[in-house]
Image: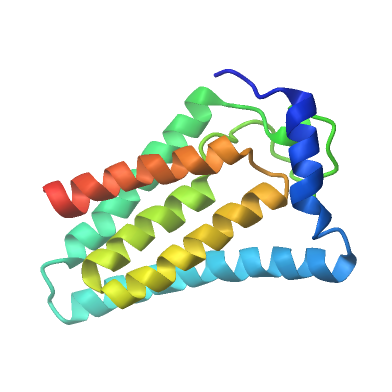
Amino acid sequence: MKHVDAHTYEEFYRRISATWRTPAKRKALLTTDRIIVALFAIVFVGTCIGLFIQHDVMVARFFVVPALTFVLISIMRVAINEPRPVQTCSINPLVQKDERGKSFPSRHVASATIISCALTAVSIPAGVIAWIGTAILAYARIAEGVHYPRDVVWAIIISLACGLVGFVVI
């Protein structure tokens, strides 16, 4: 995969992260990220349980499509093993990650996207709220410096394709 121009990315990152450089704002961004990730997990599990209790035929698809997407994204990350921005550019990320590589595609954003697809298939209002959460999470992962924009864009594209196949085509 072609790497981005380091100087261009460094300038982009400086601009996007500037807003979050105070301790309070940094904490707010990181807390928002963690809350959104936790909410996606809770809502996903809760909806699976609710569909199961209601004997809804959608329960298997609601669980299997995101699970398979998660596995696909995980395999892709290991196989591609793209470096994270801090490994290729001179940036001071808001989040220090010990993990090296496995930046492409973003698993957090891919998971949020496919769960948003699943929720939309069950409830349009819940889906709309989930899509807003996905957008905020995608922005946060870039602003924190743990992913390049292409990492989150491709995570969304791949998960949308999986969602299209799993919830519309099949």
Is residue 95 among the parts visible in the rendering?
Answer: no
Colour convention of the picture: rainbow
Residue 108 x, y percent position in the rendering:
52, 52
Residue 107 x, y percent position in the rendering:
50, 46
Residue in the image at 37% along x and 70% along y: 128
For the N terminus, which image quadrant? top right
3 relative to 136, above or below? above
Residue in the image at 68% along x and 44% along y: 146
Residue in the image at 85% along x and 71% along y: 24
Is residue 127 among the parts visible in the rendering?
Answer: yes
Residue lying furthest top: 2
Q: Quadrant of residue 25?
A: bottom right
Residue in the image at 43% along x and 33% along y: 75
Direction from residue 97 to residue 161 in the image, left or right:
left
Count of numbered marks: 0
4 relative to 27, above or below? above
Residue lying furthest right: 22
Residue 126 x, y percent position in the rendering:
34, 75
Residue 91 x, y percent position in the rendering:
83, 37
Direction from residue 38 to residue 31 in the image, left or right:
right
